[in-house]
């Protein structure tokens, strides 16, 4: 992979790293990829490369930098325990501020010729993608099985960018009643697409996870790409 680390200035005077992959053409729209609870691991690096291959300047900020910078975790039991510990220490508001700083930094990159930037996140990142749409000037946002969105529906009216949200029909972290609440809230919003994938569990779009379902992941990823291409290009 052809990625490299860049440094981003936080809004409160700190600095954090982000992993960036640019397309072979050298420039394109920006895409901020938002981590799960496992840091900038191989899944996110491979996802960044995949989007770079599709023409996007993909940037993955290290959102755990305030207490465990550079952490990289896998999906086995020991790393799951660490990941949930970090999740418990994570401050959502700081995370959104760091994502906003990342969006600003990506827009200023010479590789981001259009100035347009989208966001896409998984799990915790799916929740943060939702809040990013509500609290920042991102051009579009995509959420995969975002946890706790139903507890932040009071922020829904602040969203004025197109969104796609993907949910697993048998998700232990996002139960069907939560998806129903979210769907009901956005039922009249033409720019908010919500998809549920029956019978699937959390992380169905993450290769390497036991719950991975290739067919549904392909469908979800195609829907995500359609939004990105419509709003951002290239």
Image (spheres, rainbow, N blue to C red):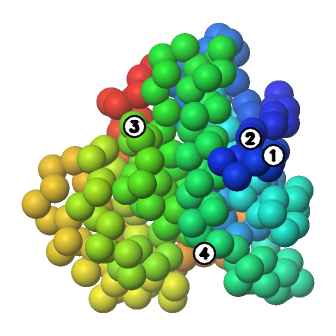
Mark 3 and mark 4 lie on one chain; the one further toward the N terminus is 3
Mark 1 and mark 2 lie on one chain; the one further toward the N terminus is 2
Q: Which residue is mark 4?
A: 211
Kindly state the secondary structure of the residue where label 3 is placed: loop
Camera-near label (4 vs 2) is 2
Residue 179 rendering spot, x and y as whole percentages = 32, 78
Mark 4 and mark 2 lie on one chain; the one further toward the N terminus is 2
Marks 3 and 4 close (CB-CB < 8 Å): no
Measure the alpha-carbon separation of dots 4 and 1.
35 Å
Q: In the rendering, which numbered label is found on residue 9? A: 2
Image quadrant assignment for residue 34: bottom right
Marks 3 and 1 close (CB-CB < 8 Å): no
The one of 232 and 135 positioned closer to us in this rendering: 135
Image height of 41 relative to 29, above or below? below
Q: Dot 3, crowdedness within 10 Å: few (<14), some or many (≥20)?
A: many
Mark 3 and mark 1 lie on one chain; the one further toward the N terminus is 1
Measure the alpha-carbon separation of dots 1 and 2.
5 Å
Residue 183 rendering spot, x and y as whole percentages = 23, 71
Camera-near label (3 vs 4) is 3
Q: Which residue is mark 3?
A: 139
Q: In the rendering, which numbered label is found on residue 15? A: 1
């Amino acid at each position: 992979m052809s990625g490299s680390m860049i440094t981003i200035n936080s809004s409160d005077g700190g600095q954090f790293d982000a992993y960036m992959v640019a397309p072979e053409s050298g420039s394109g729209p920006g895409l901020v990829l938002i981590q799960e609870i496992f840091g900038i691991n191989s899944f996110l690096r491979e996802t960044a490369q995949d989007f770079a291959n599709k023409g996007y300047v993909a940037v993955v900020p290290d959102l755990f930098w305030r207490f465990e910078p550079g952490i990289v975790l896998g999906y086995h039991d020991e790393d799951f325990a660490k990941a949930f510990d970090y999740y418990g220490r994570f401050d959502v508001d700081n995370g959104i501020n760091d994502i906003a700083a990342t969006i600003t930094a990506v827009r200023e990159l010479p590789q981001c010729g259009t100035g347009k930037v989208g966001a896409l996140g998984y799990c915790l990142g799916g929740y943060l993608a939702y809040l990013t749409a509500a609290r920042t000037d991102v051009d579009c946002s995509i959420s995969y099985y975002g946890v706790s969105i139903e507890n932040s529906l009071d922020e829904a009216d602040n969203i004025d960018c197109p969104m796609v949200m993907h949910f697993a029909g048998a998700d232990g972290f996002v139960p069907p009643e939560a998806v129903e609440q979210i769907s009901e809230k956005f039922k009249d919003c033409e720019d908010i697409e919500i998809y549920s994938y029956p019978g699937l569990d959390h992380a169905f779009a993450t290769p390497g996870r036991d719950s991975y379902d290739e067919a549904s992941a392909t469908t979800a990823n195609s829907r995500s790409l359609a939004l990105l291409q419509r709003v951002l290009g290239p």
